[in-house]
């Protein structure tokens, strides 16, 4: 049941863009309504359901004790994984993560790691042998564009509300105290903002139909102090330096809004 | 005996009747009794009992007037997306003996056509025809997608409303069975019609909806 | 004597956990349902019927029902590796067999109906809730059906037959028996049992399961009616 009017709406979008309008009557720099529900999954150490208009993303954090990587023996580990569920869109298929899912995982991972959102050194329990390993699983439940921003927002909100058990070491033995939970050492929050270029116009927070028509998109990760922590350009078309700087400006303003939304989360 | 009233909501498996009625869409017979097979509104018309679904579900039936978009073409036929589970096929031979003036309407991919269902076979291959009065290609106008109850309201129950709308707003309007409505006219008039359609979409089974719509049309 | 048995979470032998159903929760799916039962959270999406173009997978005499049961990595205490495993493969097959009798597959030859059951949080009894959700989502997708399928689990805990086992009861209990029925005719479409039950106990358990299924069926119907604004104007009713 493919939508027969998709071709018709394509012309309409281009027509509206020339009149500085979008199909859902937003301004070019206007974000959709963001709703965040934290602690949604009780079995996860941290979780958040983020909905961005018609896009819904659920992120869950599971904490396990594992061994650190050889090149960073005193750092905790964060692993990000994204699943594009078959329920989210008729174009998504069941199976191992495809290139889009992997890209989302990696961009979100970089935004969190490079900020750094979590002080990884404090997640070390015994240097070289025991560290906290945080699995962030990002579940795309419903899809209407701008997965990158929504996934990042969900991952950050989930980490901000994650509580891990306290651990004691007595005589080289590990005691996990499930009753005393503590927050993660949050250092520096970060958000991702995506700007798309359609027909030489720049728009934030694209809808799915806008993404299908886009020439290129730029996802920019910001720390709270306004510095950059990750950039990813997608899409097949070119972008001039000027356009990149304009994107940067648009995304920076949007990131301020997103940080103020993150402020409302009770930790 | 009837176990339901006209315009009552029913669910899958709801007992409708044990009389010898004709089965319309959305119904099935088991052990001599008639049940509903989907969520919808019962619609009884003399000897025919059917259940109108709430959403877009459209199943092609012989003789339906439909709007479709050409998605691909081959030597012998065009494949047409008809807003249903199945795609429709329009044979190229359909065009041969059309009038001279229509020959310039050579069909291309992405064209939007007004067609009729010529045949639906047992494995649901939908054969379409363009060889009838008034059928052909759309060159202008807007197309809106509506739910099945709206189609039912505008085309089966109160077909006169369509002509009434056209008369009062000086526009052309075609309600196709597959849930698409084509409107052509001045932009402000089209916008007015879209508002009326929205109204019907919201509550297609509302009591006195026909009077409300009528007064809206007159007061446009 | 039975009435005095109070379970660990304070329930009676015949009381279900808090049950919440919602339909039409997804924007893109043709039909969808969300079910919460205790801490279980299950999301079901249905796509289809859509035409299948590969001759290998399609059937000329009916639609192919493809059902996938999938658990989120964070849905259980110990993180589950994403992707299919033996358990979810088996459950997918069973759920698909449980709901197939209710669907008029023959009305949609050469097509497929895809059901995805996503367990966001699991706390015992997810396969039954999956069936209940799948049936609701199919009804929401307006796929022709003979009836709504209802399911619930019964089991034996401390020598008592109880309904809707929680996770703890599931692990420590003596028996677990999920049942799915077609309420209109009272036929069983899905039956599984593991544990230890005598034949009279089995009969008692089955009776309890039927009671539970009829109750759940009532809720399914109410959910569907509520969604389509049935009570408005007092004009249509069931």
Image (cartoon, rainbow, N blue to C red):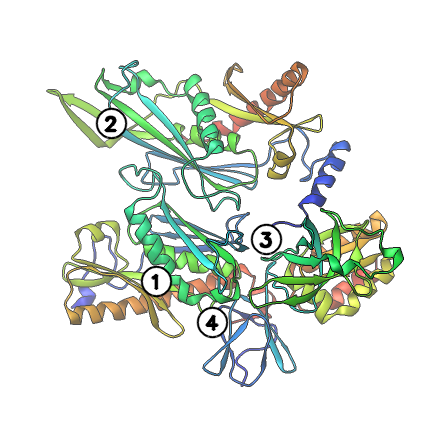
Percent x, y for residue A260? 53, 26
The Cα–Cα distance between marks 2 and 3, rounded to whole angstroms, is: 47 Å
- Disc 1 is placed on an element classified as strand
Percent x, y for residue A258? 54, 27
* Quarter containing the C terminus of chain B: bottom right
Q: Nearer the viewer, mark 3 or mark 1?
A: 3
For residue A1, the mark is: 3
Percent x, y for residue C112? 49, 56
Q: Which residue bears the numbered disc 4?
A: B13
**Share a chain, discs 3 and 1?**
no
Q: Is residue A266 visible?
A: yes
Q: Chain of mark 3?
A: A
> Up-down: is B23 above or below A47?
below
Mark 2 touching mark 4, by CB under 8 A? no
- Disc 3 is placed on an element classified as loop
Left/right of residue A81 with respect to residue C15 in the rendered view = right
- Disc 4 is placed on an element classified as loop
Residue neighbourhood size for the residue with mark 3, other residues' Cα within 10 Å, grouped as few (<14), some (14–19), many (≥20): many
Q: Nearer the viewer, mark 4 or mark 3?
A: 3
**At 61% from the left edge and 63% from the top edge, which residue is drawn?**
B59
Which residue is farthest front?
Answer: B75
Residue neighbourhood size for the residue with mark 1, other residues' Cα within 10 Å, grouped as few (<14), some (14–19), many (≥20): many
Q: Which residue bears the numbered disc 1?
A: C151
**Share a chain, discs 2 and 4?**
no
Quadrant in the rendering for residue A25: top right
The Cα–Cα distance between marks 4 and 3, rounded to whole angstroms, is: 25 Å
Left/right of residue C198 with respect to residue C151 in the rendered view = left
């Amino acid at each position: 049941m493919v939508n027969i009017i998709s071709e018709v709406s394509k012309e309409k979008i281009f027509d509206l863009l020339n009149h500085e309008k979008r199909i859902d009557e937003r301004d070019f720099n206007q974000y959709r309504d963001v709703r965040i529900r934290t602690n949604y999954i009780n079995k996860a150490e941290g979780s958040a359901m983020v909905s961005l208009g018609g896009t819904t993303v659920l992120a869950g954090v599971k904490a396990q004790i594992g061994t650190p990587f050889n090149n960073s023996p005193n750092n905790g580990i964060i692993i990000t994984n994204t699943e594009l569920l078959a329920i989210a869109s008729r174009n998504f298929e069941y199976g191992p993560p495809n290139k889009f899912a992997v890209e989302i995982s990696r961009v979100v991972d970089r935004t969190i790691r490079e900020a750094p959102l979590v002080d990884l050194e404090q997640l070390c329990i015994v240097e070289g042998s025991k560290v906290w390993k945080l699995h962030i699983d990002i579940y795309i439940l419903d899809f209407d564009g701008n997965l990158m921003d929504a996934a990042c927002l969900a991952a950050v909100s989930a980490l901000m509300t994650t509580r891990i058990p306290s651990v004691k070491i007595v005589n080289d033995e590990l005691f996990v105290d499930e009753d005393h939970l503590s927050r993660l050492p949050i250092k520096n929050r970060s958000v991702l903002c995506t700007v798309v270029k359609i027909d030489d116009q720049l728009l934030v927070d694209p809808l799915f139909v806008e993404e299908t028509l886009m020439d290129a998109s730029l996802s920019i990760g910001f720390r709270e102090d306004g510095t950059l922590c990750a950039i990813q350009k997608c899409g097949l078309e070119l972008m001039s330096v000027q356009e990149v700087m304009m994107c940067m400006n648009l995304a920076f303003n949007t990131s301020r809004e997103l940080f103020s939304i993150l402020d409302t989360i009770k930790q | 005996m009837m176990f339901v009233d006209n315009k009552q909501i029913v669910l899958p498996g709801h007992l409708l009747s044990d009389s010898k009625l004709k089965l319309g869409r959305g119904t099935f017979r088991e052990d001599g009794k008639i049940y509903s097979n989907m969520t919808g509104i019962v619609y009884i018309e003399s000897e025919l009992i059917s259940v109108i679904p709430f959403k877009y579900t459209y199943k092609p039936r012989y003789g339906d007037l439909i709007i479709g978009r050409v998605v691909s073409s081959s030597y012998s036929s065009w494949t047409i997306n008809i807003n249903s589970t199945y795609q429709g096929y329009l044979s190229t031979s359909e065009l041969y003996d059309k009038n001279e003036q229509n020959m310039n309407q050579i069909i291309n991919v992405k064209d939007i056509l007004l067609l009729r269902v010529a045949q639906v076979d047992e494995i649901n291959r939908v054969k379409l025809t363009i060889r009838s009065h008034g059928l052909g290609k759309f060159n202008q106008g807007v197309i809106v997608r509506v739910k099945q109850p709206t189609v039912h309201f505008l085309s089966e129950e109160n077909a006169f409303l369509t002509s009434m709308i056209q008369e009062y707003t000086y526009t052309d309007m075609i309600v196709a069975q597959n849930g698409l409505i084509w409107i052509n006219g001045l932009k402000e008039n089209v916008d007015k019609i879209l508002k009326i359609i929205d109204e019907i979409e919201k509550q297609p089974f509302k009591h006195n909806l026909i009077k409300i719509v009528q007064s809206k049309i007159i007061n446009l | 004597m039975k009435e005095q048995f109070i379970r660990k979470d304070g329930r009676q032998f015949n009381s279900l956990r808090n049950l919440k159903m919602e339909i039409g929760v997804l924007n893109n799916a043709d039909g969808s349902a969300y079910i919460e039962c205790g801490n279980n959270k299950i999301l079901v999406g249905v796509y289809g019927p859509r035409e299948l173009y590969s001759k290998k997978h399609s059937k000329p005499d009916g639609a192919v029902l493809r059902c996938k049961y999938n658990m989120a990595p964070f849905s259980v205490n110990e993180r589950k590796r994403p992707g299919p495993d033996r358990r979810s493969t088996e459950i997918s097959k069973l759920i698909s067999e449980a709901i197939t009798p209710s669907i008029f597959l023959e009305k949609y030859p050469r097509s497929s109906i895809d059901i995805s059951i996503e367990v966001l949080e699991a706390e015992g009894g997810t396969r039954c809730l999956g069936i209940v959700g799948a049936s609701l989502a199919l009804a929401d997708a307006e796929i022709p059906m003979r009836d709504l399928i209802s399911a619930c689990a019964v089991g034996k805990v401390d020598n008592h037959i109880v309904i809707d086992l929680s996770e703890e009861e599931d692990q420590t209990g003596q028996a677990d028996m999920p049942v799915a029925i077609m309420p209109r005719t009272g036929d069983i479409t899905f039956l599984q049992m593991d544990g230890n039950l005598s034949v009279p106990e089995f009969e008692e358990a089955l009776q309890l399961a039927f009671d539970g299924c009829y109750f759940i069926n009532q809720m399914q119907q109410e959910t569907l009616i509520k969604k389509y604004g049935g009570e408005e104007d007092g004009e249509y009713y069931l």
